[in-house]
Image (spheres, rainbow, N blue to C red):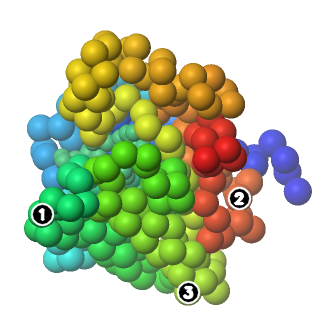
Amino acid sequence: MNFKTLFDLTGKNALVVGGAGGLGKLVAQAYAELGANVCIASRTESKLQAACEDLKAATGKEFKYYVMDAGKEDQVAAVAEKANADYGHIDILVNSQGVNKKFPALDFPMDQFDLVMHDDVASILMTCKHFGKYMKEHGYGKIINVTSVRGKIATKGPGNAAYCAAKGAVDMLTKQLASEFGPYGITVNAFGPNIMKTPMMTKIFEMRAKENGVTVEEYLKQQGAGLPMRRMSDPDDCVGTAVFLAAPASDFMTGNILYPDGGLTAIG
Ligand SMILES: NC(=O)c1ccc[n+]([C@@H]2O[C@H](COP(=O)([O-])OP(=O)(O)OC[C@H]3O[C@@H](n4cnc5c(N)ncnc54)[C@H](OP(=O)(O)O)[C@@H]3O)[C@@H](O)[C@H]2O)c1
């Protein structure tokens, strides 16, 4: 075994769904810096264009993008066909898409619950289904789903009924897909971050900080104080895990959920 290539992504082709987002963009950058050809996909073309420009400036490499609503199966099937034709084969699929809608359970609007379940769970089945078909033909694939600590530990206060249910479902979906895809040479794993400062959380942090009469920075400091690592996560803290799950180092690992969470799930 050549241990020097355990984390080498040279020649691999990766698609990051949600790759213009706070976490997905960093994962796309890391994969490119480790040798992969990387493309990104999400719904908003202007954000994809801006992200590709930032990624090129950061790495010197070209990034393609695909406008795709991962919650619409016809779009997912079309992008799976196009990306596999453009790159020969997509080896690595990251599902970093998602939304979070917060309401107390007693008042949760069911259309918002359905929206979260569709965007955070059904979209993952759709991308895995359509990209998985090409990975099966190729005999190789690495799928990485982004879940959350909230798939494992509920929040103390109200608000997360949909998000917790969705991320718990992502965890079980990951295990079932691992079981079904393993014989085709495809690994399916997930990682679950703790809360991080990304566009998804900006408004929520502002709201919580206001409720507590502190600045966002002070609120995050307070949230981190009780963790073993004594600070909140940055999206950067998750990149190593995303690389591990995409790299040859994890080739015999499937159906696992890893937590780059500062220790929350150890004590939660
Ligand atoms: N931030 C946190 O504290 C935190 C903690 C734990 C887990 N996570 C998870 O980490 C992942 C990334 O979140 P983030 O923090 O990076 O949030 P973000 O900055 O809001 O990024 C989410 C990305 O997903 C895309 N997206 C949403 N729905 C989509 C759909 N139906 N089809 C295609 N793309 C879609 C969004 O782009 P468009 O809207 O343009 O499509 C956006 O680029 C999510 O799964 C989230 O649940 C985040």
Question: For the view shown, which residue lies furthest in the front direction?
Answer: 106
Q: Relative to 36, say whether 256 is above or below.
A: below
- The residue depicted at 39 percent of the width and 59 percent of the height is 164
Disc 3 residue type? Glu
Mark 1 is surrounded, within 10 Å at the Cα level, by few (under 14), some (14 to 19) or many (20 or more) other residues, namely: few
Q: Position of residue 249 (x, y in %)?
A: 74, 54
Q: Relative to 205, say whether 112 is above or below.
A: below
Residue 232 shows in this picture = yes
Pointer 3 residue? 180
**Disc 3, disc 2: CB below 8 Å?**
no
Disc 2 residue type? Ser
Left or right position of 220 against 260: left
Q: Relative to 68, say whether 238 is above or below.
A: above
- The residue depicted at 32 percent of the width and 60 percent of the height is 161
**Disc 1, disc 3: CB below 8 Å?**
no
Q: Position of residue 126 (x, y in %)?
A: 31, 75
Q: Earlier in the sequence, mark 1 or mark 2?
A: 1
Q: Position of residue 229 (x, y in %)?
A: 66, 27
Q: Earlier in the sequence, mark 3 or mark 2?
A: 3
What whole-number distance in Å separates the C-alpha atoms at marks 3 and 2? 18 Å
What whole-number distance in Å separates the C-alpha atoms at marks 1 and 3? 34 Å
What whole-number distance in Å separates the C-alpha atoms at marks 1 and 2? 40 Å
- The residue depicted at 63 percent of the width and 53 percent of the height is 258
Disc 1 residue type? Pro
Mark 2 is surrounded, within 10 Å at the Cα level, by few (under 14), some (14 to 19) or many (20 or more) other residues, namely: some
- The residue depicted at 36 percent of the width and 75 percent of the height is 125
Q: Which mark is residue 250?
A: 2
Q: Secondary structure at mark 2?
A: helix
Q: Secondary structure at mark 1?
A: loop
Q: Position of residue 226 (x, y in %)?
A: 59, 28
Pointer 1 residue? 109
